[in-house]
Every structure is written in structure tokens, then in C-alpha cells.
Amino acid sequence: MGTPYTLRTVYTFYTVYTPELREGSRTLATYRTARHESRPIFKVSCSNCTTYEHVARERGGGAVSDQREILVGERDDGTDLYLPVVELLTGRGFVTGKSGSGKSNTASVIAEELLESGFPLLIVDTDGEYYGLKEEYEMLHAGADEECDIQIGPEHAEQMASLALEENVPVILDVSGYLDEEVADELLRKIARQLFVKEKKLKKPFLLVVEEVHEYIPEGGGMGETGRLLIKISKRGRKHGLGILGISQRPADVKKDFITQANWLVWHRLTWDNDTNVVGRIIDTEYSELVSELNDGQGFVQTDWMDVDVRKVQFRRKRTFDAGATPGLDDFERPELKSVSDALVGDLQDISERKDREESRILELENELEKKEKRIETLEDELESARDVSNAAKQMADALTRKETLQTKLGGGDDEELRRLHDEIVDLETERDDLEDERDELQAKLDERTNRIETLEGKLSSRTETVDRLREENERLRDRVRDLETAVETEEVEESNAESTDETEILQAGGDDVEFGFTSVEWPSQTESDADESEEITTAPEPKPPEAVFEGEWIDDRLERAAEQSQCTASTARRALVVLARDGPLESAAIADAVGRSTVAVQGLCSELLTEGVVERPVARTYTLSDDVRSKLDAMASAE
């Protein structure tokens, strides 16, 4: 028998390619996306269970787990399919299917649910089709196109990894706009290496999504340094918290080591024999034929954590703009996209501008130096020619009778021209030396700045370790404070019980027990009429803080679990519930302002409270108290 758990009413956004109402469900309402598509909201209830095991089986089968889960679609038996967040973030995934079968939609659905729960990720977009996620989520769109938030190069790799891991900024790395494929490959390689290195210290669950993964880790050979690094992440990244999801429309072209090491796979429609043969080898021969019969959005899901090896699933449609859809005859309308912080873009632009200035100055010096060298060569040719003329003139003068007069006429002018050319060459060589010195000085400054950056990175790493140590010490102190508070409460209860059972008479000087408040009012000789006339002595209760309403056995455990899984405390959770009870429904940003915490922290807290059934999410990023919590509050108010 598992942990007691009452399954209450759950509200969930639910849309598939061909939505149908299941038996026992009914449409409560509809909402409209930015593209004005109506989406039904289903109310799903279960009345035949009261244990967490049944809920786990209903959500995906297998053992009981305290892991967060996300809804991605519907099984062929009509039940919802949930996938555990930690397995997606830290595992090795592979999604495949021919063009139009729904593989990119599946990746977008997983990305939407992770972003909705406050988990950042980095998507390597090879075709420029994931910027539609910015319709609902604040993401940094980086690449080479002007449509991106910022144009970046390999020199930005360390900063991009820091933003993604340390600042929790979701990133779309759009490599489709780089004309030089080697630059795009170097950029991805450096960012992936920085993610791997930083995760060794942070150990924070994080997902790297790579589209067209067969271009980096091909089966036929010719794998470069970037592909070898991605294979290394797939083998060793999990223990550091770094997961990878590879996407490809040609599984036969993907290195088999990557596919066989994946612990969750999604097979969409495949028709080419080489691809279906891969399905037969990985799953079973019967699926090599079944996979070619799948409809759009359908796929076979294969995971290590389900009690059933393979499930047929209809994935829901992505909520955000489908930038990868085939263009139609209608005019293309780009949706309104959420922008990221100007400070983030500004930091990256400073790096680009500084590097551009340095490279432009070096190029300018090199061009100027090249011009001077060409001028020196021209003057040297002229000088050599002048010397030849001078020598010829001297020889002619020696042959003539009046050689002194002729030599004076011919040689004097030539010597002056030689001196002029020589002086000009000396001046140009001096100027060239000055330019070379200036170039060497700039290069030295650049090397010094590089060394300074490396020194600062070392200091930053040391400070990061110090911060981690202080956080651990702070957490131990919190635990100690909780233990002390529990001990004090226990002592107060014991003292209160002792006082209530102590029958020793209390003596007072100059007064009786009633006057001093040490005994209850009892009148042995009172008649019934006297009792009616006696005044009732009452004491006004002390006012309780608003947060006290959300204390008690009915909710404490759920708040503690939500606090442990988020960056907030149980006290912050109670303050957030007071705000929702008073002003809800509210967006997570408004709740964060009210309780004085960051939006990212409160978003994670609200997601955990949603999992615990304490709050509901009527629309995206908007929360309100759940029905059973409101019912409990109404009952408490009636009792008072």
C-alpha cells in the first residue's frame, strides 16, 4: 500500500491532431491561442482510487515516483501519457520520422511543457523553425540572421553557456543562417563543450536538443570533433545532469551507438526500407511494418522506465506558432514574439563590438602595411633603374675627351635623384617599422586581455564553489532551526498538558481564584436563577496572521513537498496562497511581485503546487486556488 493520496479534479490543456471527447469526460471551456485556434479544456476525474500507485499507473505505468511529469499526448487506449521531467532533462533521447510525420512537433511539445514548468534548455535549430516558441516564452534567439535577438560567433560560446545554465535563460541556437558551415560547427562545438564543463560543477538538470543530428554523428563515418563531443555528452553527460535529445528524419544515417544508448525514443512514420529496418532491429520486426502506417502525430514511444516496452501515442499539437509548416498561398503573418532582457543582449553585443573593433584595427594596419611594402618595392625598382642610368652615364663620360664636364652634367643630377629615392625609402621603412610596432602592441594588449579573462574565469569558478558551500551551510542551518522550532513546540505542548493535570491549589494574597484567573468559575450554592443572571467571562482570541489559514495537517505536507522541489520555502508558499485567495487568478509574475521573490522561483513553486493539487492553471502561466482548497477554506469559515 503506498502513500495515501486522494485524486481530486484535475484541469489540463489537452489537444491532439484529431481531438475526440472520451467517455466520462466533458468539455468545460475553450481558450484561444495567438493564432486564434480553439483548444478544448477537459475535466478528467477518477473516483475508483485513493492511492498514489493508481495515479502513477494512470499517468504512465511503472513504480511510484516523486518525479515531476509532463503531459505530451494520448495513448491508443484513450489514457493520457505523462513523461517524467528528470528523465527528459538528464537522459538520452532520440526522436525520428520522415518529413511531415510530426517529429519536430513532438520536440516542440516537450520544449513547451519544460518551459511551462520553468526548466530552461538549449535548442540547436538547423532550419530556423523553433523561433515560434517565443510566441509564449521568453527565449534568447541567437544566430547569424537579422531576425535573431543577437548575432553571435564562436567567441560568445562561454557567455551563452553561462546564460543557459547559470541564469536559467532558454536559448534557441539558430545555425541555419551561417554561410560558412565551419563557423556554425565551431560555435556549436564550443557551446557544447562549455555546457559539459560547467555541468561538472553545477550538476543541474539541463537538456540539449539537436536537430538533424545525423549531420553531426553520421553512421557512415566522417564524424568530426563536434560529433565526437555530442557522443561524449550522450555517454557521460547524464551523471553530471546534462541530457541530450537528437532529432533526425533518417535513422539509418545516424550512428547506431547514439540510438542504442538512448533511454527514451519516439518513432514517427518512416517508409524507406533502410529506416524501417532500423526500427525492426531496435524494437522488433513487427514494428518495421507498423511504423509506416502511422498517421501524422502518431508515434511509438519506447522508454526504460515504463512497464510496457512500446506504446502507441497520439502527440498533441504544439501551442505556439508553427514556423516549420509548409508555406501556403495565404500571406505569411509573423506572430508577435516575446523579447528578452535588453541587458542580456547588450552584454553579448559588447563582446561582438569589442572583437569587431580589434579585428578591424588589425586588418586596417595590415592593409596599410601591405601598401607601404608595395611602395617600398616600387621605389627600390626605381632606385635600381636610376643606378643603372648613373653607371651608364659614368661609362660614357670616361670614354669622352672632356669627361670631367660631361660627368658633371650627367652625374650630378643622377646623384641627387639617388639621394632623394634613398631618403624616401628610409622614411617608408621607418613608417613601416612604426606600424609593425603598433600592431605588435595591439596584439600584446589582446593577449593580456585574454589572460585577464582567464584569470577572472578562475576567480568566478572559485567564487561559485564558495557560494555553493555557503548555500549548503545555509540549508543545514535551516534544518537546525526547524528542529529547534519543533523541539520548542513539543516542550510547550508538554508543559501545557502538565499544567492542565496539576490539581495543586494556587494561593494568592488578597484575592480569590476567580479574581486572579487561576480557576474556572464554579458556584457551589448557585441556584438556577442565579446562574442565569451570572455574566459569562470570555477572553478575546489573539488575531492570527493570514498565512495561518493555510496551516494544518490537510495542507502542510503538500506545501513542504512543493517547497523542497522548488527554490522557495513553505512560508513563501503560504504567502503566495494568501495572495491567490485574495486577488486570484494571477500570473506567476504578479505573484512573484507580491511575495518578493523572482519570477523563475515562483514559477517553479506554482508548478509544484499544481502537481500537489493545491492550485490550478486555468490558462498558461496563470494560477488560482484549486476547488478542494477553496472548499476547505469555506468549511473553515463556516465553522468559525
Image (tube, rainbow, N blue to C red):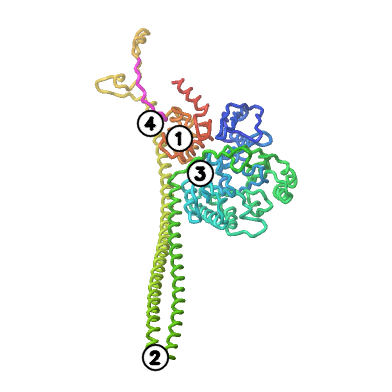
Name the residue that disc number 2 marks: 402
Q: Mainly helix, strand or loop, the magenta region?
A: loop
Residue 563, percent from left and from top: 47, 38
Q: Earlier in the sequence, mark 3 or mark 4?
A: 3
How far is mark 1 from mark 4, CA to CA? 31 Å
The amino acid type of the residue labelled 4 equals Glu
- For image coordinates 34% across by 13% down, the residue present is 535
Residue 306, percent from left and from top: 64, 42
In this rendering, the answer to whether 469 lies above or below 58 is: below
Question: Disc 2 vs disc 4: which is toward the camera?
Answer: 2
Q: Earlier in the sequence, mark 3 or mark 2?
A: 3
Name the residue that disc number 4 marks: 495
In this rendering, the answer to whether 631 lies above or below 355 is: above
Q: Earlier in the sequence, mark 1 or mark 4?
A: 4
Residue 18 in magenta?
no
How far is mark 1 from mark 3, CA to CA? 27 Å
